Image (cartoon, grey):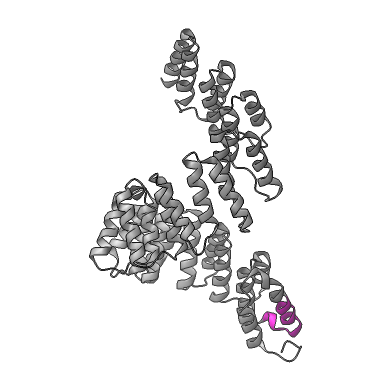
Amino acid sequence: MLRPGGFDQATLTIALSVCDTPELCFVTKMVHGLAVLSGYDSVIPVGNALITSYYKCGCSVSGRQVFDEMVQRNVITWTAVITGLVQSELYLDGLRLFSLMRRGLVQPNSVTYLSALSACSGSQRVIEGKQVHALLWKVGIESELRVESMLMDMYSKCGSIEDAWNVFESAEETDEVSMTVMLAGLAQNGSEEEAIHFFIRMLQDGVEIDANVVSAVLGVSFVDNSLGLGKQLHSLVIKRRFSGNTFVSNGLINMYSKCGDLDDSLSVFRRMSERNYVSWNSMIASFARHGHGLAALKLYEEMIRQDVKPTDVTFLSLLHACSHVKLINKGQELLKLMQDVYGIEPRTAHNACIVDMLGRAGRLEEAKSFIDSMPTKPDCLVWQALLGACSFYGDTETGRYAAEQLFQSAPDSSAPHILMANIYSSRGQWKEREDDQENESDGSE
């Protein structure tokens, strides 16, 4: 079938269409080589198929190279590469190419516009999103349901919930997808009560409630503060048979945890037929959040035995757990493991956890040395962790140093003055406290 002379362009494009995972990238390269040998690489449909296949296989550099080398391109060519860039989370590159496409007088199709909106969502570029919205209005496809849903999603993810709501309200018709997008947007932008009211409206209007809707509602912090409402949602999950949905179960774990009900949180986790890394992270975080550090570490060991790869979020929860139960050596061991074995570089939050862990144990000089050894400049979160420990132990000298650094990182923050006042008070240094308060007053004028 793949012998030179024994295939045509249709065979090549069909073969490429099934190459859509990283494991099949070598097959895409083989087919690409055959296309070059047979001269089909200059045929637009084959080039388009190569671009699509390379991006789906995660070979974005090869996909872009095929595009750059194509002498002739059509709208499908441009759409394939823009969509591929967006799927590879190269959002700004996707937007730049979309702009270049329009300058080249190639008219985008609806799929191109949807990819451009996804690029705006991913990069949170609301200005560019509004420009795409204007183009959609100009070509007359802004009222298509899937376009409206994508517009709502874009505005929501860019933090412009009012614009998302305006799109929803002006829609000629809505469906379950658009209503779910709007609900998720309200939840993600802190409009908790509006999200709950919107969900109730969906129920009253007889909208088909699916697992995605329930998952979005479970993400509302308003639900987290109301165990009664959370249990009603859990009853709905059982009634609609959504318990097998991993995302819904993850939401239930978080909901029960934030309500302080660890037993039900663990019960949901144990009953899951399939768990992803988010499931494990959620349960480990639940234990750490409520001070059950040893339980968090034990569950982490079970996670490793199940061959689930930990993420930076996993280690963040574990460091919190070690901090609360003062397992200093274990925390330092986990930080090293995170870097050396899993190749995860610590974020500010991880470093702040280490400082907090050392500080809680009274090892303030060691905490300061750790900060000094950091490869990146510490930010306010790190200095606040050190200053908090100094406040607890009444260490004036280290506290003053941390306060100065914190003030430089966050000059508008009142935290350094409040914590230093606590340190001075605990040591009976009333004059120093008064001087610090005067300096704060002078700085605010």
Left/right placement of residue 294 relative to residue 142 reads: right
Vertical side of 122 occupied by 258: above or below: above
Residue 90 image point, x, y percent:
58, 59
Left/right placement of residue 328 relative to residue 137 reads: right
> What is the magenta range?
30-42
Which one is nearer the viewer's eye here, 188 or 12?
188
Please give the name of the residue rendered at 73% of the width and 77% of the height, measured from the top-left corner. 30
Which one is nearer the viewer's eye here, 350 or 146?
350
Left/right placement of residue 222 relative to residue 49 reads: left
Looking at the magenta stretch, what is its main secondary structure?
helix
Q: Is residue 241 magenta?
A: no
Residue 21: which quarter of the image?
A: bottom right
Whether residue 353 is visible: yes
Residue 286 image point, x, y percent:
48, 46
Vertical side of 123 occupied by 414: above or below: above
Residue 385 image point, x, y percent:
54, 30
Whether residue 407 is visible: no
Which one is nearer the viewer's eye here, 244 or 102?
244
Total of numbered circles in the picture?
Answer: 0
Residue 226 image point, x, y percent:
32, 47
In the rendered image, the residue lying farthest to the left is 204
For the C terminus, the quadrant is top left
For the N terminus, the quadrant is bottom right
In the rendered image, the residue lying farthest to the top is 431
Please give the name of the residue rendered at 59% of the width and 24% of the height, measured from the top-left corner. 362
